[in-house]
Image (cartoon, helix red, strand yellow):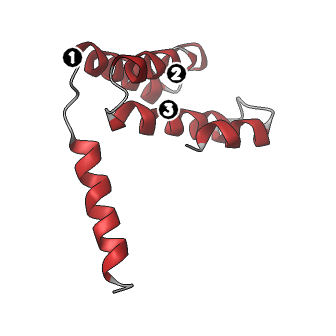
Amino acid sequence: MATIAPQVQEAELRRALRKRPENLDAYECVLRGLDLLIRLEHDMFMQALPLFKRAMALDPTYAMPHAQAAAWHSTRFDQGWSVVFLDRLRLARP
């Protein structure tokens, strides 16, 4: 039974991340945020999080903006753009 649980959890996570947003404006915010996120140019990168937050507000059940916001916090730390590690770690956790 213990070996099945991680596989079920992983499958459920993949399903949640594939879920289509109920709100197309939320989807657009995620796409715009992803474009800014992957550029890794500080000023553009910093504009991505508000877009992910807006997507979360528009469609709280849409998993992708939550996941990308967590990735944003992690990447911000990895790039050395965050000086307060514990604060950023707290924000990256659900």
Specify the quadrant of the image occupied by residue 11: bottom left
Check disc 1 and report the residue beneath it.
24
Q: At 33% from the left edge and 23% from the top edge, which residue is drawn?
A: 59
State the SS at label 2: helix
Q: Quadrant of the C terminus?
A: top right
Q: At 70% from the left edge and 29% from the top edge, which residue is drawn?
A: 81
* 25 left or right of 39 in image: left
Foreground mark, 1 or 3, reads: 1
| Residue 16, image x, y percentages | 27, 46
Q: At 43% from the left edge and 39% from the top edge, which residue is drawn?
A: 67
Marks 3 and 2, how far apart at CA: 6 Å
State the SS at label 1: helix
| Residue 38, image x, y percentages | 43, 29
Check disc 2 and report the residue beneath it.
49
State the SS at label 3: helix
Q: Residues within 10 Å of mark 1 (few under 14, many from 20)?
A: few
Q: Which disc, if any, is residue 69?
A: 3
- What amino acid type should be assigned to the residue bearing mark 1? Leu
Q: Earlier in the sequence, mark 1 or mark 3?
A: 1
* 84 left or right of 78 in image: right
| Residue 48, image x, y percentages | 48, 19
Q: Earlier in the sequence, mark 1 or mark 2?
A: 1
